[in-house]
Image (spheres, rainbow, N blue to C red):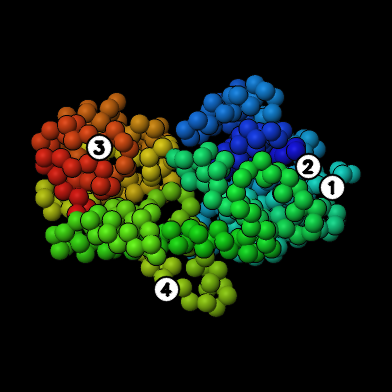
Amino acid sequence: MRASLVGTGYVGIVTGACFAHSGHDVIMVDNIKEKVDAINAGRSPIYEKGLEEMISEEVRRGRLKGTTNLREAVEFSDITFICVGTPALPDGSQNLAYVKAAAEEIGAAIEEKDIFHTVVVKSTVAPGTTLGTVKPILEQTTGKKAGEGFGLGMNPEFLKEGDALNDFLKPDRIVYGCVGEGAAKMLREIYAPFSAPVIEKDCTTAEMIKYASNSLLAARVALIDEIGNICKALGIDVRDVAAAAGMDRRIGPHFLHAGIGFGGSCFRKDVSALAWKGGELGVETPILSSVISQNDAQPLRIVQLLTSRMDVKGRRIGILGLSFKPGTDDIRDAPSIVVVRSLLEKGAKVVAYDPMAKENFSKLFPQVSYAKSASEVVASSDSVLVLTEWKEFADPSLYGNKPVFDGRGVTRTANYEGVCW
Ligand SMILES: NC(=O)c1ccc[n+]([C@@H]2O[C@H](COP(=O)([O-])OP(=O)(O)OC[C@H]3O[C@@H](n4cnc5c(N)ncnc54)[C@H](O)[C@@H]3O)[C@@H](O)[C@H]2O)c1
């Protein structure tokens, strides 16, 4: 099939590269020219294991290319996926400006086309958005009816950064909702090369499945962190507790790693958006609200632990790990931001190392010193905080007798304390 994708961020570029890899012809659209140029040169606009190799291979084969011209991309393709950002507004609702702008531009391009075209919302949007916001925009700009003059679908993405290619190529399930048979046929065809259970429903159910999944995962992390805080006060190790609790098949072992809380661009904004949607519908959501407040407070527990052991004013504090999780250069909503900001406010000098995220982090915190290696951080600091579970931080010999405060359960060293153990 011929597919176009609008937005070359984490979701867009992974989806585009994987569609090309599975035999489709793909054109990526972004309004940032540098990202498009990178793709056309066979480079990845973001870091994800194996992604650059895949992009370079598919560009060389002629199955993947980029453009800043959305009209050209719609003309070239049968189906267009909207993969733009949906950041949170201060009240917790979503900023749909990017989705609306993309829908307007796509609609105008479809209006000029004679052949049937399908538009699919892949961005995470609150239940009701595809039918309530995107559909009217497309109907107005095309002058056609959804399901008749053009196809409309909603296809949430479940990839996790750090293992995104694997998740996309071997998904646990593929979920989409459609207006009309034309869209359903195209979505079946584009996902035909993937072997996974397919859940074909209406658009609002597809949207809600994504929110339910992220809310359940986020709630699990917030709860094990809260349990971890109690374990710490009791002087016991939450990792022993979680391992045993997770052996119960009704609970299972995943997402039971207590620490300094979840980060990333999705969980917080998706939980907030669902709580906001509940409010709009007159449904109370005390659990969703607690997940957010619990997680917002959790990163500071490692600062409280450190300051209960030493006065940090004027001291050099080493930070290992800046990305919100290993395997990515993404620092959006990373706990490291809260921790570093707090340390700087308390008068500490911060020296940090991350194998991937230094460039992104240094744009936010130019006043931090950035080391070239973990051992340089350890050697040049009075105390070390481990904030991301990169494998290279696990080796106890890295730390000698330096005081280490571990926010992720990565290591166990001679002079060591964990945030929840
Ligand atoms: N990052 C994840 O792990 C993940 C996982 C699942 C779902 N999602 C959802 O997918 C969506 C995209 O997330 P992301 O992390 O890839 O976002 P991102 O911010 O990394 O990328 C969005 C891209 O869209 C481009 N863009 C915006 N408006 C445009 C327009 N009108 N025309 C062309 N390009 C435009 C931006 O320049 C940017 O490159 C969000 O709704 C997010 O919640 C993200």
- Residue where numbered disc 2 is placed: 78
Amino acid beneath label 4: Pro
Question: Label 2's element?
Answer: loop
Tell me if 245 is positioned left or right of 161 in this view: left
Is residue 76 shown to the viewer in this render?
yes
User: Looking at the image, do the residues carrying marks 1 and 2 touch, with CB atoms under 8 Å apart?
Assistant: yes
Which is more N-terminal, label 4 or label 1?
A: 1
> Which numbered marker is on residue 286?
4
What residue type is disc 1 on? Phe
Whether pointer 3 and pointer 2 mark residues with C-beta atoms closer than 8 Å, the reply is no
Residue 296, how many percent across, how many down?
35, 58
Residue 74 location (% of width, % of height):
77, 40
Q: Amino acid at mark 3?
A: Ala
Q: Residue at x 69, y 44 (%)?
A: 192
Residue position for label 1: 116
Give the mark nearer the N terminus: 2 vs 4: 2
